[in-house]
């Protein structure tokens, strides 16, 4: 299929970017800041790139209201990399290497598997037996006295399950995987010890991972920790212990400026609520579509749904993509459909999808 315009892209990540940002990156690609070179072609240590880097961090700090006792690291290796880095950096805080996990889907499950290489990964609660459709009530969690931290996935991208807020834990630091809901709503950073996210969903292109760490949690890494994932070493080197992903950092910076122009995180939250409500209302009112997630923890950024007549799946995907509504197939581990509606998905995109789904049901 070929299009002469931009489609509405519901991909889970890499995901759609604001057209305005792509246009700006295009316009300044060949001759950035009058240097006669692209931002991709200059030293990461040049004063021009360092200025972008500093501004990017300052804008993120402002947008997320990140307190000064938290370090922001821009690393490589994605959320998957942090699944290893987190136990290596934090488990030594406990007498013997151990952490608690709340398992609410495939991403938190992956975090458990990786952490097991470095210490004990205790499953404090899991919704696996119920098919990952809800978040276990905090009163049922079996938290350990001797865990270095508690890990949650704030938004399960595949299942479409989201924590409404961070659980209150007392003294054990909370580690939150915010890969798929960073900057989509106001978050109280000080309720967490560590937050991490890849850029390729709510922010920019793949290749840069944001790790926000309370400063007292740095400097305890296991000796085996690769230097590029030792948070204290990275912090001491302005996240440039090795060559950083300069282009993704630059585009992420443009997206932060775009979010600020739109009205900040509060406006992103308002839009995300509006967009997800539109879809859930349609799904709940329909006799063809269904969402299987507990309404208390439905994701605002990844709306999953099934066609009750699965025989219509192929037709649904074919017709939606012909209409310029791309990438609605659910993750292969979950089946069904998924509309990922991150910050850069316009409200008009969701309106078009809702209209298409209504029309498809009418014809079915
Ligand atoms: N956590 C969550 C919630 C995710 O959605 C993803 C990516 N889909 C990851 C972790 C892994 O991120 P990456 O591919 O950047 O390593």
Image: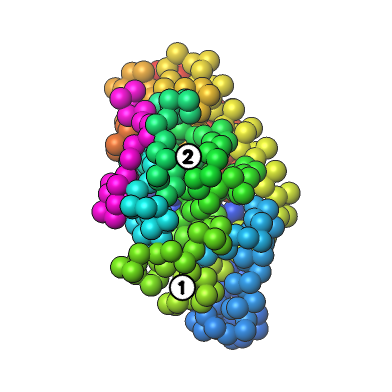
Assess disc 2: are there few (<14), some (14-19) or many (≥20) residues with their C-alpha within 10 Å of its C-alpha: many
Q: Which mark is residue 193?
A: none
State left or right for residue 261 relative to residue 253.
right
Q: Position of residue 38 (x, y in %)?
A: 54, 79
Q: Residue at x 51, y 18 (%)?
A: 284
State whether label 1 is within 8 Å of ligand 1. Answer: no
121 inside magenta stretch: yes
Residue under pointer 2:
155
State left or right for residue 330 relative to residue 169.
left
Of the 4 image quadrants, the one containing the C terminus is: top left
Q: Which mark is residue 233?
A: 1
Q: Residue at x 59, y 28 (%)?
A: 277
Give the residue at the far front of this rendering: 95
State left or right for residue 19 relative to residue 121.
right
Q: Position of residue 278 (x, y in %)?
A: 59, 27
Q: Residue at x 63, y 60 (%)?
A: 69
Give the residue at the far top of this rendering: 287
Task: Say how the picture is coloured.
Answer: rainbow
Q: Is residue 24 above or below residue 136?
A: below
């Amino acid at each position: 299929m070929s299009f002469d315009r931009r489609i509405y892209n519901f991909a889970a990540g890499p995901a759609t970017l604001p057209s305005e940002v792509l246009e700006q990156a295009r316009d300044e690609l060949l001759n950035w800041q009058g240097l006669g070179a692209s931002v991709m072609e200059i030293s990461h240590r040049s004063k021009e790139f360092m200025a972008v880097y500093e501004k990017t961090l300052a804008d993120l700090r402002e947008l997320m209201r990140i307190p000064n006792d938290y370090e922001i690291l821009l690393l490589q290796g994605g959320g998957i990399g942090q699944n290893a880095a987190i136990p290596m950096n934090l488990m030594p805080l406990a007498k013997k290497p151990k952490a608690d996990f709340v398992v609410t889907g495939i991403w938190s499950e992956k975090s458990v598997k990786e952490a097991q290489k470095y210490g004990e990964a205790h499953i404090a609660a899991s919704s696996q037996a119920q098919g990952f459709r809800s978040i276990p009530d905090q009163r049922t969690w079996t938290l350990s006295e001797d865990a270095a931290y508690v890990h949650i996935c704030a938004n399960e991208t595949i299942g479409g399950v989201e924590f409404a807020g961070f659980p209150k834990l007392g003294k054990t630091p909370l580690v939150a995987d915010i890969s798929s809901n960073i900057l989509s709503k106001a978050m109280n950073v000080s309720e967490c010890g560590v937050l991490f996210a890849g850029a390729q969903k709510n922010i920019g292109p793949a290749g840069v991972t944001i790790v926000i760490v309370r400063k007292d949690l740095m400097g305890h890494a296991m000796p085996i920790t690769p230097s590029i994932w030792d948070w204290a070493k990275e912090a001491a080197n302005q996240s440039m212990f090795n060559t950083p992903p300069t282009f993704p950092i630059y585009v992420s910076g443009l997206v932060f400026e775009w979010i600020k122009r739109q009205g900040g995180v509060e406006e992103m939250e308002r839009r995300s609520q509006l967009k997800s409500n539109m879809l859930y209302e349609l799904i709940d009112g329909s006799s063809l579509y269904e969402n299987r997630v507990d309404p208390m923890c439905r994701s605002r950024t990844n709306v999953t749904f099934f066609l009750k007549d699965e025989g219509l799946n192929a037709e649904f995907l074919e017709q939606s993509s012909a209409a310029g509504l791309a990438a609605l197939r659910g993750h292969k581990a979950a089946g069904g459909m998924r509309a990922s509606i991150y910050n850069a998905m316009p409200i008009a995109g969701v309106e078009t999808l809702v209209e298409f789904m209504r029309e498809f049901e009418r014809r079915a």
